[in-house]
Structures are given as C-alpha cells and as structure tokens.
Image (cartoon, rainbow, N blue to C red):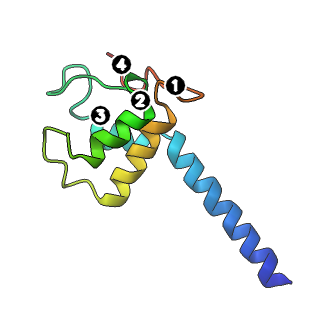
Amino acid sequence: MKKTVFSMVLSISLLGASMATASDPALFLAKCGVCHSKGGQAASINPADKAGAVWKKYFERGRHPVDISSISAADLEKIVEFLVAGAADSEKPAAAVIPK
C-alpha cells in the first residue's frame, strides 16, 4: 500500500514538474533570449509568433540558421514544449516573453 501511494505521489509530482516546464519561460530566456532579444543578433521571437505545429516542424527539420548544438537535446525539447504551449493556436498564447 505504501509503495502504491509513493508511486502515485511521485507520478503526480513529475507530471506537475513537466507541466511547469512547459509554461516556464526561464529556460527559453536563458538559452534563446541572448540572441532573440531587442538589440540581439537575431530577430525578437515569442511563442505566439507561430502555431504549435510550425514550431515543432521548424526544429524537427533543423531550420534554425545558427548552430544550436550547445543546447542539450533535453533542454531543446523543453524549449519546444514551451513554444508550443504558448503558440498562437494554443489556449494561452504568450506574446510578450521577449519584448520586441
């Protein structure tokens, strides 16, 4: 019984952590904000600039013009989750994460 309760609590806490990651802009700002901010070397971007499917395809197809291999696969996955969660076609588009 204790094992079952522990497993359920662990599952719920992990689910909560993954949901928090999808809505937390900190990783996006740390990894992407350096270049994609006002005055940066790349255009300002925000999750609501594209639809969720477009963000996914953009990274799946390797369309980013600059080498982003320094970003771990796990971090890149979290960044894409964040972009999709705040995409133009999402329930809560995130239009002002990085000021333009």
Front-most of residues 56 and 3? 56
Q: Which residue is mark 3?
A: 33
The reply to whether discs 1 and 2 touch (Cβ–Cβ < 8 Å) is yes
Q: Earlier in the sequence, mark 4 or mark 1?
A: 1
Query: Relative to 94, is 31 above or below?
Result: below
Q: Earlier in the sequence, mark 3 or mark 4?
A: 3
Disc 2 crowd, CA 10 A, few/some/many (<14, 14-19, 20+):
many
Disc 4 crowd, CA 10 A, few/some/many (<14, 14-19, 20+):
few
Q: Earlier in the sequence, mark 1 or mark 2?
A: 2
**Picture residue at 75% right of the left edge, 76% below the top:** 6
Q: Which label number is shown at residue 99?
A: 4
Q: Report the side of 66 relative to 79 (left or right).
A: left
Q: Report the side of 82 relative to 55 (left or right).
A: right
Q: Which residue is mark 1?
A: 93
Q: Earlier in the sequence, mark 3 or mark 1?
A: 3
Q: Split into 4 quadrants, where in the image is the N terminus?
A: bottom right
Q: CA distance from mark 3 to mark 4?
A: 10 Å
**Picture residue at 42% right of the left edge, 50% below the top:** 78
- Where residue 18 appears, x then y in whole percent? 56, 54
Q: Report the mark closest to the observer, 3 or 1.
A: 1
Which residue type does callout 1 highlight? Pro
Q: CA distance from mark 3 to mark 1?
A: 18 Å
**Picture residue at 68% right of the left edge, 67% below the top:** 11
